[in-house]
Image (cartoon, rainbow, N blue to C red):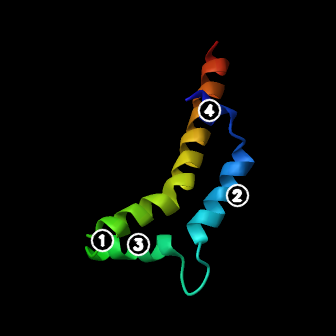
Amino acid sequence: MQWLDRTPVSLLVIFSILFGLAPFVPEPHALEKIRMLVHGDLRRPIDIFDLVFHLLPSLLLLLRLARVVVRKKQHADD
């Protein structure tokens, strides 16, 4: 996961915002797909792919931040 450690957090934040909110009008795809998931309507493979596609940068950001926290904790314990 060295590639993720080398990726700047700021870049992941930008991609998370852009991908999470795209398209901006009439409503973000991620919000629409999450609403479909909650209602049990997320069944088509294209809809599942779309949800994963739009949330992937956010998931990578969370993973990157978790790795930063773990590394800081490890250095504090040393």
Tell me the residue that label 4 is attached to. 3
Tell me how far mark 2 sits from mark 1, CA to CA: 27 Å
| Mark 2 secondary-structure assignment | helix
Q: Nearer the viewer, residue 56 or 72?
A: 56
Do the residues under discs 2 and 4 have CB atoms within 8 angstroms? no
| Mark 1 secondary-structure assignment | loop
Do the residues under discs 1 and 3 have CB atoms within 8 angstroms? yes
Do the residues under discs 3 and 4 have CB atoms within 8 angstroms? no
Q: Earlier in the sequence, mark 4 or mark 1?
A: 4
Numbered circle sitting on residue 33: 3
User: Splitting the image into 4 quarters, where does residue 66 fall?
Assistant: top right
Question: As displayed, is residue 41 above or below residue 51?
Answer: below
Q: Earlier in the sequence, mark 2 or mark 1?
A: 2
Q: Position of residue 56 (x, y in %)?
A: 51, 54
Residue 38 visible in image: yes
Q: Is residue 68 left or right of residue 53?
A: right
Quadrant of image for the N terminus: top right
Tell me the residue that label 1 is attached to. 42
Q: Residue furthest bottom?
A: 26
Residue type marked 4: Trp
Tell me how far mark 4 sits from mark 1, CA to CA: 32 Å
Q: Nearer the viewer, residue 2 or 65?
A: 2
Q: Earlier in the sequence, mark 3 or mark 4?
A: 4
Tell me the residue that label 2 is attached to. 14
Q: Earlier in the sequence, mark 1 or mark 3?
A: 3
